[in-house]
């Protein structure tokens, strides 16, 4: 099925299989997509607002220039999505237990997000912005964070010896997150 410039409001997609559908320029407002099968779907220039996509199946799903605003995105495996053209931005989203492992996410913006226990292992986060994001127990292993902006991010633990941080931006208050593996006592 092909949908163009359509608005979906308060639709419960959790019991429907949308596999293979193409959504171009569509808007999803207050929709329930939790546990929905979005395998093979293609979302282009679309916006999700106040939607719940928790535990949705994303096998070979395509997200190209997609905005997520105030969405619940818990337990998602974005790393199963189609890598070609993947481009998303996240504003005020709950991204707990979400995997972005081994993905190219250059210039992605995460604004005021809760990324508890998210996984960025071996991801390319070049020039990404984490604006006022809580990164509690988020995994950064062999991650490229060159020119990334984490000045207002908090609760992160990033090992400079295990990640590429050239020209990444941090605040002085956030330096503990780069040193916590050394179990130092840093006082004001």
Image (cartoon, rainbow, N blue to C red):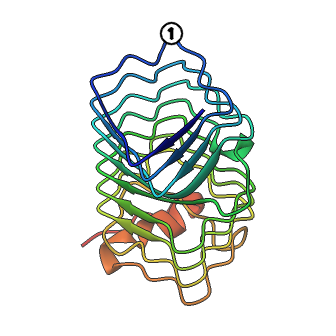
Q: Which residue is mark 1?
A: 15
How many other residues sit within 10 Å of disc 1, few (<14), some (14-19) or many (≥20)? Answer: few
> Quick one: SS at disc 1?
loop
Residue 39, percent across and down? 69, 31
Q: Residue furthest top?
A: 15
Residue 168, percent across and down? 52, 83
Above or below residue 174? Residue 112 is above
Q: Is residue 136 left or right of residue 55?
A: left
Q: Residue at x 70, y 50 (%)?
A: 101
Above or below residue 182? Residue 25 is above
Residue 94, percent across and down? 37, 39
Residue 56: quarter of image? top right
Residue 10, percent across and down? 27, 23
Q: Residue at x 60, y 77 (%)?
A: 126
Quadrant, the N terminus:
top right
- Work out whether residue 172 or residue 126 is closer to the camera in this orientation and state it: 126
- Work out whether residue 83 or residue 141 is closer to the camera in this orientation and state it: 83
- Work out whether residue 110 or residue 2 is closer to the camera in this orientation and state it: 2
Above or below residue 91? Residue 125 is below
């Amino acid at each position: 099925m092909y949908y163009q410039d359509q608005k979906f409001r308060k639709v419960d997609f959790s019991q429907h299989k949308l596999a293979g559908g193409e959504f171009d320029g569509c808007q999803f407002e207050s929709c329930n997509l939790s546990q929905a099968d979005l395998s093979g779907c293609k979302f282009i220039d679309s916006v999700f607002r106040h939607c719940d996509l928790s535990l949705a199946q994303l096998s070979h799903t395509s997200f190209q220039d997609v905005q997520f605003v105030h969405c619940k995105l818990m337990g998602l495996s974005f790393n199963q999505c189609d890598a070609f053209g993947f481009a998303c931005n996240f504003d005020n989203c709950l991204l707990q237990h979400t995997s972005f492992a081994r993905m190219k996410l250059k210039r992605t913006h995460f604004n005021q997000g809760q990324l508890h226990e998210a996984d960025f292992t071996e991801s390319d986060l070049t020039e990404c912005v984490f604006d006022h994001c809580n990164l509690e127990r988020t995994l950064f292993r062999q991650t490229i964070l060159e020119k990334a902006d984490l000045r207002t991010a908090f609760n992160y633990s990033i090992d400079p010896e295990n990640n590429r941080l050239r020209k990444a931006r941090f605040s002085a208050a956030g330096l503990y997150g780069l040193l916590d593996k050394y179990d130092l006592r840093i006082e004001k």
